[in-house]
Amino acid sequence: MDDTPAKIEQRYKEMLLSKSPLERLKMASRMYDSGRKLVIAGILKRRPRLDSSRLRAQLFLRMYGSDFTATDRERIIKKIPNMQLDTDS
């Protein structure tokens, strides 16, 4: 999707490049944290009674699940402490 006018895109690029590497890293970290909170809120809205281990598994699947095969996803979930795959997802 490319709906941003070139002039605005250029200004945004200049703004990012004017920041130090540390500032850009902090921005990226805040964006990741915000995205993670939104994903958690979405999971809990659909399934408010998930315990923490199942929530961790759902978060993993939502954020990284498409990067792995089903077999790899199950193997990863079994290896991470306090993470269980939900049986009725």
Image (cartoon, rainbow, N blue to C red):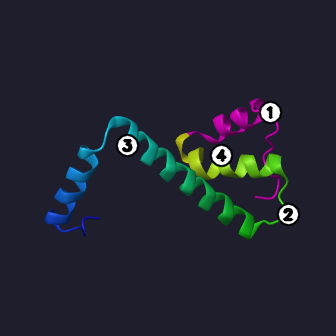
Q: Is residue 86 magenta?
A: yes
Q: Which residue is at 71% across, 32% downward?
A: 75
* Amino acid at dot 4: Phe
Which numbered disc flags the more N-terminal residue, 1 or 2? 2
Give the residue type at disc 3: Arg
**Quarter of the view holding residue 39:** bottom right
Q: Nearer the viewer, mark 1 or mark 3?
A: 3
As drawn, is 52 to the left or to the right of 24?
right
Which residue, given by chain and number where applicable, does mark 2 sit on?
A: 49
> How many C-alpha atoms fall within 10 Å of the one at disc 1: few (<14), some, or many (≥20)?
few
Residue underneath mark 4: 60
Q: Secondary structure at mark 3?
A: helix
Residue 78 position in % (x across, y down): 78, 34
Instruction: Give, as a single range, the part of the protein colored magenta.
Output: 68-89
Q: Mark 1 is on which residue type?
A: Pro
Magenta span includes 75: yes
Looking at the image, tell me whether mark 2 or mark 4 is earlier in sequence order: 2
- Specify the label residue 24 is tagged with: 3
Label 1 or label 4, whichever comes before in sequence order: 4
What is the distance, in whole Å, between disc 1 and disc 2 at their CAs? Answer: 20 Å
